[in-house]
Structure formats: structure tokens, C-alpha cells
């Protein structure tokens, strides 16, 4: 008797076959003494179309809506039906007594297998292979620790609810609003609110009215000849205390202080600490590669998938966790030793030379590891020189991020001086580095601490102040009025859009708050790149250099949909519900009933437009 293993892709099937010593080639499978390996090619089974329930539903008619099948059915995808039939025959083979689900370890992977299992009418016992790396060691370890397939029933329920919700909302909303507007308006549960975020940002930019403002900049000279810069403080302006919108006022200040003497009223120094970056999840890796390499989210995912599947150099990339579980902690030093070569040798040795590897709850945290842990190197020996330039660039980001996570904080002093001249106050700031910490890992690109999203009293100039102290006399050496303009919001890049999708429309930098909102995002890390590409390929969005801009077609679509379809919070609530279903904390029937009520509402709203 044999066990049938179903992988998600042929390449993964071959990796598992190598470990299980399945070398005999068949049509769509590999066989050995104890196991048979076969594979899907992505999705082989999909949800039925409306006309599969009733031929009359092929025609788009408003009186057919809403279409709410009592039970959603599945069917084979014509393009891959041959491979599906091969798997069905293997499942039915009397020699096969058990099945191993070895599709990708996540929501969609579970759905792919369960749909095949259901379509084939198979009832044989199932074990689940759940791994985060495709190295031989990881596969062998996973095979030794398999769980009963029933333990993943909640994950399957979540996946099925996601698929059925997308079908019900997308199909009904598209038909309803297309018929009521006499124009094809494709809509989706996730893509429509994502497009709305781009349209809203575009509207903010278009409506922005730039205002001219002025700053008085000075260069002060100490008695010993050292100089430093200062900016006039407009205490009457609460919005920004270093600007005035009155040109005459700025010029009057300039005339008032020219060549005058003054005194340093105060000097305050405060130590600042910036913690190292957390490990990557897929969304953060995509953001990083968009900012630093100019890669699209889709390209980053494709390259990361190659590093995972083809080269076995990184762990499973489609993860939404930025933490590692405790069982991985003992293996980390070995991983660092394995990557201590070339440009990374000195950086790795800095960690390896310490008595113990410095780990914190920002790295190891069982409670915050979801289906998979953060993306880290596997310690594979393949040299970077054997990778393509894109693969090497993404792998470099992952290696440096992994090493930086174990480095100490970047520590620096911020000195703020207030200088008084003719009763006018000027602020000067400077930074002095005390411990480079994790920024050492990025020294090749002159990495600086992350900029704050808003200008604040903590913003620090790169200027270094000379040795100054309270009551030092100074002379105004130079002064000028700078004319500037307020800036509109910046267009979304893929990096900022991914953040907004992850946080249900809110641009958030705070790590703790981002973590709390993860279950309420638009889509999943694995699907967000595809959503962005779909919007571009459908002609709703243009990619202009790094910016994403809605087209007239996209703007027109958003203008015609109800507010509920535009709001990311709506979809965010569903994603949170899907997460609860996967955890066994929510009944799937309750979720689907809410989706059906929403679909009925959408159809009613569309009918009011006719």
C-alpha cells in the first residue's frame, strides 16, 4: 500500500519526491516504494459560474439579481482538467490508502487541496505537511511531524468563505452596477476599496492649494570662529513654528538681526535610541524592495518565491508574521554561521563573537507567529554569484534585515540650542552618533534612521553643532529669507499602498499598532500584489515611475459605487472575521449570512440608479 502526496506545483512535488526517493516517472506523477507524488498546477478546481446553476443566468438581467446559490458548487478548470483527472485516478487507486496534503502551507494552499479532494469524491484519510522551507532537512522534519488533516478544517472554512464571498460580491456587484450604468464596471470585494484609496489620494492632490511661506535662516559665529545654523521661531504660528506666511514680517526680522550680536539662551541634549528593524513579512519585504530597488510588489513576490522554491535560500515568503517561534531560536546561530561569507562575514562575526545571540520579544514571540514565521535565510550554501541580479538584490535585503534584527539600537544625542538676537529666537539642532548599532549593517548605503512621517520637535538635521554652551555670545554672520511652498500629499507608491492595504486604509508606522491591525487589512500578503496588478491591467490605475495614479476610468468607477464598497474598513472587517474563522473563534455561517445581506443591499442600491 502507498501514500499519495499532493503538492501545489510540479517543482515542489519534485523536491518532496527527492526526499521520499520517488524516482519512477509517470504521467503527471513520480512514484517510489512507499509514496506517489503528484501535483496541482495552482488552482485545478474553481467555483461554478451562474449559468452552471441555471442556463438562464448566463444573460445579464437585473431581475435575476441577486444570485445567491443555496450551496456553492465547484467544477474543474478546463485548462488543467487533464492533471486533475490524473490526481483523481490516483486518489481512487486501490493501492493508495492515505493522502498527504502538501500544498502551500496557508489559506489558499489549503483551499486548492480541499477542492481537489472534494471534486474527486475522495474519503481516504489525510495528513497535512506543514513546512516553512523547502530544504531537504525541513521537508524531512515536516514529514515526521505531520498532523491529521482535520486539524486544518477551520483554515479550510476560512479559505472557502473568502472564495465564496469574493464570488458573491464581485459577480453580483459587477452585474448590478454594469446594468444600472450601461457600462462594464468590474468590481471586487478587495480591489474596489483599494482603487478607492488611490482615487481619494488623487483627489486630495488635485484639490490641494499650495501656499507660499517664508523661513528666516541664519548662520551664527562664535567668538572662536566656529559657526552653526539656526532657524527663526515664529511663536505666533501654531501650525508650524518655523514659518510665516507674511513675507513682510520675514523681511523685517531679517533687517532687524543683520550683523547683530546675541546670546545662546539654552542648550539641551537628549539621548535618542532607534531600535533595529523587525524581521520581514511579505508586505514589509515588498515595501522595502519598492523603496530601495524600485521593484513592484508582484516582482518582489516572484523573486522571493524563486529564492524559496528554486534556490532554497529563504523560508516561506507568503507570511504575515514578523516574528520567529521559540523552537527556531536554537537554530539561529547556525544560520548566521552559514551566511558569514563575503560581504556579510564581518557583520555576522560581530554577532557570533558574542557569548549568546541577543534575542528579544521583537524577534522571538510564539504568540505573534501565525501560519508561518518571518522571512529569514535558511542557511543554504548557494553562492550569491549564482543568482540573477534581481534575486541577489532581494536576497541581500533579507540577509541584512536578518542580521540587523540582532544588532543593538542606534544611539545618538540630539542637541537643541535656542539663540536670542534682538529678542528674536532661533532654533538650532544637531545630532552626534554614540553607537551606530544596527545601522552598521547598512553602512554600504549610508542608511539613516527612518524619517518621521510628520515634522516634529524631534526631527534632527544632519548638521553637527560645534562645542557650545549656555550664555555663549554670538554674532549673526549671514542671514536670508527662504521662500517655500506647502506641499500636497504625495501620490501612493506601491510601498505606501501596501501599508494602507495592510492597515485597512490607515498609513501607520508604529509597529505595535500595525501588528494589532493586521487581521483587518485588505487582502492578504499573498494576494495584495495580484490586486495591484489587476487594477493596472484593467486600465484603472497607471504606474508612473514609482507612483500609482488612477486613470479617468478608475475615477469614474469609484464615483458610481456606493460608499460601502469604497470604504476599506468594510473589507477590513471581513478579513478580521476570516481570521477568526481560521482560529475557530467565529461560525462560518454567520459570516456568509452577513455577506449575503450585503449583496442584497448592493443590488438594491444599484436598482435605485436605473
Image (cartoon, rainbow, N blue to C red):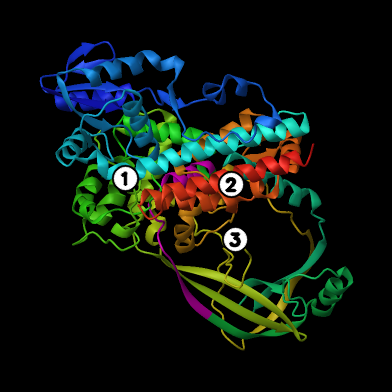
Which callout, 2 or 3, points at the residue further toward the start of the chain?
Answer: 3
Residue at horizontal 63 percent and vertical 71 percent from the top: 228
- Find the distance from the CA under tag 2 to the CA under tag 1: 56 Å
Instruction: Give the mark toward the camera: 3 or 1.
Output: 3
Q: Is residue 57 visible?
A: yes
Magenta-tinted stretch: 269-290
Residue 502 x %, y %: 51, 50
- SS for callout 1: helix
Residue 249 x %, y %: 86, 74
The image quadrant of residue 38 is: top left
The image quadrant of residue 276 is: bottom left
The image quadrant of residue 602 is: top right
Which callout, 2 or 1, points at the residue further toward the start of the chain?
Answer: 1
- SS for callout 3: loop
Task: Tell me, yes or no, whether the highlighted magenta stretch contains residue 160.
Answer: no
Instruction: Give the mark toward the camera: 2 or 3.
Output: 2
- Find the distance from the CA under tag 2 to the CA under tag 3: 39 Å
Looking at the image, residue 178 lies above or below residue 362: above
User: Residue under circle 1?
Assistant: 344
Amino acid at each position: 500500500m502507498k501514500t499519495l502526496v499532493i503538492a501545489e506545483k510540479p517543482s515542489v512535488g519534485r523536491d518532496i519526491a527527492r526526499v521520499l526517493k520517488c524516482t519512477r516517472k509517470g504521467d503527471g506523477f513520480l512514484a517510489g516504494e512507499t509514496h506517489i507524488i503528484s501535483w496541482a498546477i495552482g488552482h485545478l478546481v474553481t467555483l461554478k459560474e451562474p449559468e452552471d446553476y441555471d442556463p438562464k443566468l448566463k444573460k445579464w438581467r437585473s431581475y435575476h439579481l441577486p444570485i445567491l446559490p443555496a450551496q456553492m458548487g465547484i467544477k474543474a478548470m478546463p485548462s488543467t482538467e487533464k492533471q486533475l483527472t490524473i490526481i483523481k485516478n490516483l486518489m481512487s487507486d486501490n493501492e493508495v490508502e492515505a493522502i498527504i496534503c502538501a500544498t502551500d502551507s496557508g489559506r489558499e494552499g489549503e483551499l486548492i487541496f480541499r477542492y481537489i479532494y472534494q471534486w474527486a469524491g475522495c474519503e481516504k484519510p489525510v495528513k497535512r505537511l506543514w513546512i516553512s522551507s523547502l530544504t531537504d532537512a525541513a521537508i524531512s522534519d515536516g514529514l515526521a511531524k505531520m498532523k491529521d488533516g482535520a486539524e486544518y478544517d477551520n483554515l479550510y472554512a476560512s479559505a472557502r468563505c473568502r472564495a465564496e464571498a469574493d464570488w458573491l460580491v464581485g459577480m453580483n456587484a459587477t452585474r448590478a452596477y454594469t446594468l444600472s450604468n450601461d457600462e462594464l464596471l468590474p468590481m471586487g470585494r478587495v480591489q474596489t476599496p483599494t482603487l478607492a484609496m488611490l482615487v481619494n489620494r488623487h483627489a486630495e492632490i488635485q484639490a490641494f492649494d499650495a501656499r507660499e511661506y517664508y523661513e528666516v535662516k541664519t548662520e551664527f559665529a562664535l567668538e572662536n570662529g566656529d559657526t552653526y545654523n539656526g532657524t527663526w521661531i515664529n511663536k505666533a504660528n501654531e501650525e508650524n513654528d518655523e514659518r510665516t506666511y507674511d513675507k513682510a514680517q520675514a523681511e523685517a526680522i531679517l533687517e532687524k538681526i543683520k550683523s547683530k550680536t546675541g546670546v545662546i539662551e539654552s542648550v539641551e541634549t537628549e539621548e535618542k535610541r532607534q531600535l533595529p528593524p523587525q524581521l520581514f513579512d511579505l508586505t514589509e519585504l515588498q515595501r522595502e524592495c519598492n523603496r530601495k530597488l524600485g521593484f513592484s510588489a508582484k516582482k518582489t513576490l516572484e523573486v522571493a518565491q524563486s529564492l524559496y522554491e528554486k534556490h532554497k535560500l529563504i523560508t516561506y515568503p507568503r507570511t504575515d508574521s514578523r516574528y520567529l517561534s521559540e523552537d527556531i531560536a536554537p537554530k539561529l546561530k547556525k544560520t548566521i554561521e552559514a551566511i558569514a561569507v563575503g560581504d556579510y562575514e564581518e557583520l555576522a562575526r560581530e554577532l557570533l563573537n558574542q557569548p549568546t545571540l541577543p534575542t528579544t520579544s521583537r524577534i522571538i514571540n510564539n504568540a505573534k507567529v501565525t501560519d508561518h514565521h518571518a522571512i529569514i535565510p535558511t542557511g543554504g550554501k548557494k553562492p550569491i554569484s549564482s543568482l540573477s541580479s534581481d534575486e541577489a538584490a532581494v536576497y541581500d535585503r533579507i540577509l541584512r534585515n536578518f542580521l540587523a534584527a540582532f544588532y543593538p539600537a542606534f544611539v545618538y544625542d540630539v542637541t537643541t540650542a535656542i539663540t536670542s538676537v534682538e529678542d528674536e529666537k532661533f532654533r538650532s539642532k544637531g545630532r552626534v552618533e554614540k553607537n551606530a548599532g544596527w545601522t552598521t549593517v547598512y553602512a554600504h548605503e549610508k542608511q539613516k534612521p527612518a524619517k518621521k512621517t510628520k515634522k516634529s520637535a524631534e526631527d534632527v538635521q544632519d548638521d553637527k553643532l560645534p562645542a557650545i554652551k549656555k550664555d555663549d555670545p554670538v554674532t549673526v554672520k549671514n542671514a536670508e529669507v527662504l521662500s517655500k511652498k506647502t506641499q500636497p500629499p504625495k501620490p501612493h507608491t506601491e510601498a505606501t499602498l501596501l501599508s494602507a492595504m495592510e492597515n485597512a486604509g490607515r498609513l501607520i508606522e508604529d509597529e505595535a499598532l500595525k501588528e494589532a491591525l493586521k487581521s483587518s487589512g485588505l487582502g492578504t500578503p499573498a494576494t495584495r500584489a495580484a490586486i495591484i496588478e489587476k487594477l493596472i491591467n484593467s486600465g484603472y490605475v497607471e504606474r508612473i515611475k514609482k507612483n500609482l495614479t488612477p486613470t479617468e476610468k478608475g475615477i469614474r468607477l469609484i464615483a458610481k459605487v456606493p460608499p460601502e464598497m469604497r470604504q476599506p474598513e468594510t473589507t477590513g472587517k471581513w478579513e478580521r472575521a476570516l481570521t477568526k474563522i481560521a482560529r475557530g473563534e467565529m461560525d462560518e455561517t454567520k459570516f456568509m449570512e452577513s455577506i449575503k445581506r450585503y449583496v442584497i443591499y448592493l443590488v438594491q442600491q444599484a436598482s435605485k440608479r436605473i
